[in-house]
Structures are given as structure tokens and as C-alpha cells.
Image (cartoon, rainbow, N blue to C red):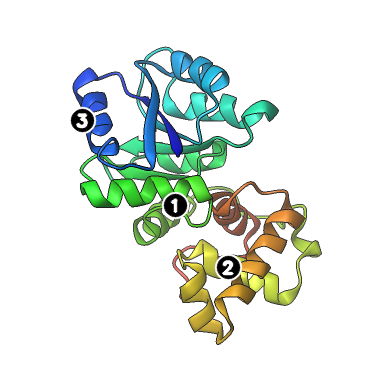
Amino acid sequence: MIRVLLADDQPLIRAGFRALLELSDDIAVVGEAGDGAAAVELARRLLPDVALLDVRMPLLDGIQATRRIGADPELDGVRVVILTNYALDEYVFAALRAGASGFLLKDIEPGDLLQSVRVAARGEALLSPSVTRLLIEEYVSTPPRPVPGPGLERLTEREREIVSLVARGMSNEEIAAHLVISVATAKTHVSRALTKLGARDRAQLVVFAYESGLVVPGAGA
């Protein structure tokens, strides 16, 4: 059973998401919060598998709440997914930097919502990869010049290649097809890169790839 925490300052939106999530036998909404501070407190008390946080909330916004959850060792197993109204919300990349595993648009189809929660709980793939890639390229195109991040030298050439493909939104299956390797081999390379870089999930691999300069915004795969 995947345990989900919902946080949004609009009760009707929370009710809608709860109704959709509870259509599935393998997902349970274990708590609701109307602001970011309450969301962090509930996360500590309930230890959900996935926390769906609205990016704009009173007291603490979704980014601040994500940062606090990510900084708490006892919440290491909580995957944060940001809810937003717009694909290019100016706060979303900041949320990924803060430790979010991905994001969802609030107009997501019911079936896609359920599948996305399952994916986030597994930590296997960045949500909405094609949209996420566009968002990241939009918001990393203007920061200061990237510098090699700590840990980059620990990656093999193949692992660097794998991380760059993850950053471009590819799933393990797509990486395997692109490199003509097995899906199991692709998963192994991703896991090793996560371990070497101290990253908790694929979203952090994406942030690392762009901030270190391993991937250049706008460059083709």
C-alpha cells in the first residue's frame, strides 16, 4: 500500500485529489494539510511514501516544505512531488533543487495521476519527463556558468553518459534502446550513479547533470 500525504490550501482541490487517489486499491491518503508547515509536521508524524505538495501555500510554500523534508534524515524515504498549475512554473526547478522527486500538473488525467504516484513511490523515474526537460532547460539557461560538481570525477564514462540521458528525460527502457544495452544494465548504471553522487533519486541526477555542465541546456541527446 502506497501511503500519500496531500497538501494544498484549497480544500476542494484536496478533496478532488483524494477522491481520485482512493479509486486505487494500492494507494491510501493518510493525511491532508492546508499549509506547508502542517505538511512538514504531518510528514514527520505519518512517514508517507509520497507527499503531494502544492507549490504555493501559506506559512511555508512547497519549496520550503520540500527543503525541510529533504533535510530530515528520518524522512529519507518520503518522495516529494510538487503540484503546479503550469508546466513552466517558475518555482518548479527550485523545488527540484530542494529535493523534490518531480512534479505534476493539476489537470493531470486520473489514470496518469495514479501511475505517477506509483512511479514516485518506487523512485524509478522522473515524472512527466518531456515537460520536465523543457522546464529545466528554461530555468538553467541563465544561472552562472556551470562548474564540475563534486562526485563527477567518480563516474565512469558510461555512467556520465547514462546520467546525461536521464537528464534529458529518458526512462531506463529508452536509455537501453538508445545505447543498445539491456534494461537491467541501464538500471544498474543508474543505481551506481545515484550511489556515487549521493543522490536520492533520478530528479537529483537531473539537477546534478545541468548544474555541473554535464548536460548543456538546448543540446540534443
The residue beneath circle 3 is 16
| Viewer-nearest residue: 98 or 16 | 16
Disc 2 to disc 3, C-alpha distance: 36 Å
For marks 2 and 3 on the same chain, the one whose residue lies earlier in the sequence = 3
Compared with 73, 162 (above or below) is below
The residue beneath circle 1 is 119
- Disc 2 element: helix
Question: Which amino acid, mark 1?
Answer: Val
- Quadrant for the N terminus, please: top left
Compared with 85, 35 (above or below) is above
Q: Is residue 205 visible?
A: yes
Q: Is residue 216 visible?
A: no
For marks 1 and 3 on the same chain, the one whose residue lies earlier in the sequence = 3
- Position of 111 with respect to 200 (left or right) is left
- Using a 10 Å C-alpha cutoff, classify the residue at mark 3 as few (fewer than 14 neighbours), some (14 to 19) or many (20 or more): few
Give residue 25's position: percent from left, percent from top. 33, 42
Question: Which amino acid, mark 2?
Answer: Ser
- Disc 3 element: helix
Tags 2 and 1 touching, CB below 8 Å: no
- Residue 174, numbered label: none
Q: Residue at x 72, y 58 (%)?
A: 148
- Position of 104 with respect to 174 (left or right) is left
Give residue 175's position: percent from left, percent from top. 52, 75
Disc 1 to disc 3, C-alpha distance: 20 Å
The residue beneath circle 2 is 164
For marks 2 and 1 on the same chain, the one whose residue lies earlier in the sequence = 1
- Using a 10 Å C-alpha cutoff, classify the residue at mark 1 as few (fewer than 14 neighbours), some (14 to 19) or many (20 or more): some
Question: Which amino acid, mark 3?
Answer: Gly
Write down the quadrant of residue 6 in the picture: top left
Tags 1 and 3 touching, CB below 8 Å: no
Q: Residue at x 49, y 45 (%)?
A: 121
Between circles 2 and 1, the one closer to the viewer is 1
